[in-house]
Image (cartoon, rainbow, N blue to C red):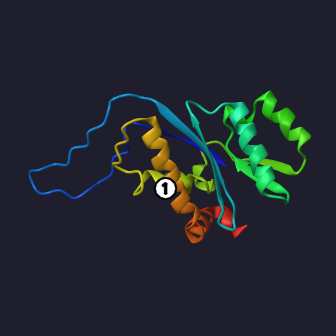
Amino acid sequence: MDESGFSLIPPTRRTWARRGEPPIIRHPFSWPKLSAISGVTRDGRLYLHLVRGSIKSNEVLRFLAALLRHIRRRVIVLWDNAGIHRSQMVKDWLRAHPRLWVEYLPPYACELNADEGVWEHLKGAPLGNYCATDEGDLERRVRYCVHRLQRRKAVIRGFFQRTPLARV
């Protein structure tokens, strides 16, 4: 699992243009934020929860509860040591839900987190250079891109293959 954010300022990517005519990206220079928390499974499933604003502990708990509703077996969560993951509210909730087991990744070890591949993928081709007009437009576009990615299980499994944990 991991969190990331999207804003109305588009992630810029390289593109083709005629010599002497550089591409211009026009966007409203504002900073409304759309945050996302997601989780991927080894068998190629992607779960995502979008929030306007920042993700706080209660949003993490909503996501974990939804995850337990969708996955009936024991769930092992690998995530970083972000403050919202270590809050007292989250610790108490985890104690009450023994079917969920949490392992914390070492600090600054994003190469171990398969979910980082989701953000790299989404902010690359599907959302790169996309100029949303407002938060609603951005949310629709992110949901559309995530829905397309959810149908590509081999790509999601590939996010695990790029981590050293795939050999464990």
Give the vertical position of 90 relative to 152 (above or below): above
Where residue 49 appears, x then y in whole percent? 63, 44
Residue, far bottom: 154
| Residue name at image x 42 percent, y 29 percent | 31
Q: Is residue 97 left or right of residue 65?
A: right
| Residue name at image x 32 percent, y 32 percent | 28
Where residue 59 appears, x then y in whole percent? 69, 35
**Number of on-image labels:** 1
Q: Nearer the viewer, residue 88 or 60?
A: 60
Query: Mark 1 is on which residue type?
Result: Cys
Q: Nearer the viewer, residue 166 or 122?
A: 122
Displayed quadrant of residue 3 = top right
Where residue 4 appears, x then y in whole percent? 55, 42
**Looking at the figure, which quarter contains the C terminus?**
bottom right
| Residue name at image x 83 percent, y 50 percent | 101
Give the vertical position of 129 relative to 45 (above or below): above
| Residue name at image x 33 percent, y 48 percent | 129
Crowd class of label 1 (few under 14; some 14 to 19; many from 20; radius 10 Å): some
Where residue 58 appears, x then y in whole percent? 73, 32
Give the secondary structure at mark 1.
Answer: helix
Displayed quadrant of residue 65 = top right
Residue, far left: 20
Q: Is residue 35 left or right of residue 40?
A: left
Circle 1 is placed at which residue position?
A: 145
Displayed quadrant of residue 43 = bottom right
